[in-house]
Image: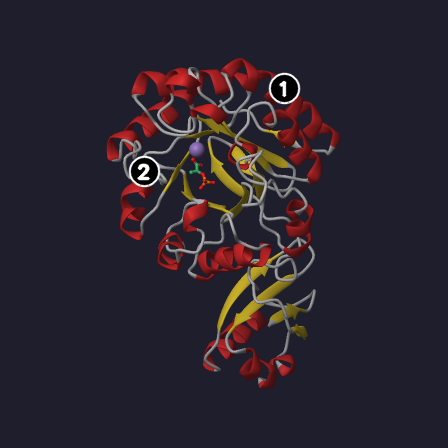
Amino acid sequence: MIIVLKPNFSEEQLQHICQKIEEMGFRYELSRGVQRTLLGVIGEEDELRNAPLKAIAGVEDVLSVLKPFKLASREFHEEDSVFELGHGVKIGGGSMALIAGPCAIEGPEILLEIAKEVKAAGANVLRGGAFKPRTSPYSFQGLGEEGLKILREVGDETKMPVVTEVMDPRQVDLIDQYTDILQVGARNMQNFNLLMEVGKTDKPVLLKRGMSATVQDLLMSAEYIIAHGNKQVILCERGIRSFDSSTRNLLDLAMVPNVKGLSHLPIVVDPSHATGRPDLIPSMALAAVAAGADGIHIEVHSCPEKAMSDGPQALLPNQFTELAKQIQELAQVFNKKVATTP
Ligand code: PEP
Ligand code: MN
């Protein structure tokens, strides 16, 4: 249920409305937009429908949201959400994130080398996994806390906010100490305990679409995080499973404008994991910009053949440099900008 406040509501009226909602046993989230201020009331729809919310002074309208996701919905927050990622980088509402780096953090020298290259090319967020969700238990699992320290140091040295994956609710506190953005990977999109835990932090969460997740599943997972207190959810399309093995996954670009209509949350597209093919990544990255993405996420490695994870899909720094230039140029066509870091 969404309460639309009258344009000229007073702060006393707002306080009174919030108090009434709590007295009725419901929770609420406030959304102050440029045009309107809204309250998302959370509780059983049937009970809410019968509550006399419209009778309270300052209330203009009470709308029933039929979609199962509410706080993530466009109805609740009309304008695009914009989040600060660190070092002056924003995502959403015309600001684009260009997230780049290796799949896994492999050591301080190699990460610094890649970070300097992607930064010089125009990336504004550095990525790297310290805890890796590998299909095989015998594959490299990541450097763990050592990797987090390296990522933090390299991010500080190159003045870029950093993002790294958290796989387990028990790791959230540790990873939160080192990172600017918490990544929830495709394999954990419906790890509800993890979603609740990252929902208690104050860091933006990059929520990747599960490989068999519908758009609604993704938005419901975002709803989990927001309902637990963290509004800063960044959605990520990284390809879904299909019958065709010619690409690693199937990039669902239509979901970008689709989700934009349904939700106010920013969306990043990851053509690296979606295609798994360096020859397809540039065109799919540019198509994602044209589709309305708020960010592009690309894996880059200076020596893909030696990479300890996802080497075959990594772009070389010079390939990334060329692509970053094209992304920036195309972004301008859509009145968007990839912010530069200091
Ligand atoms: C990654 O970003 O390295 C990763 C494992 O991504 P995904 O969860 O999309 O597979
Ligand atoms: Mn990867």
Could you say where residue 205 lies in the image, as x and y percent from the top left?
Answer: 45, 46
Q: Residue at x 50, y 75 (%)?
A: 43
Q: How is the image coloured?
A: secondary structure
Q: Residue at x 53, y 58 (%)?
A: 217
Instruction: Identify the amino acid type marked 2.
Output: Phe
Q: Secondary structure at mark 1?
A: helix
Taking 342 as reference, is 260 above or below it? below
Q: Secondary structure at mark 2?
A: loop
Q: Where in the image, quadrant-wise, is ligand 2 located?
A: top left
Q: Nearer the viewer, residue 5 or 194?
A: 194
Res 131 label: 2
Q: Nearer the viewer, residue 28 or 153?
A: 153
Q: Residue at x 66, y 49 (%)?
A: 260
Count of residue discs: 2
Instruction: Identify the amino acid type marked 1.
Output: Lys
Find the distance from the CA under tag 1 to the CA under tag 2: 31 Å
Could you say where residue 331 lies in the image, as x and y percent from the top left?
Answer: 68, 30
Quarter of the image for residue 49 reads: bottom right
Could you say where residue 115 lies in the image, as x and y percent from the top left?
Answer: 43, 20
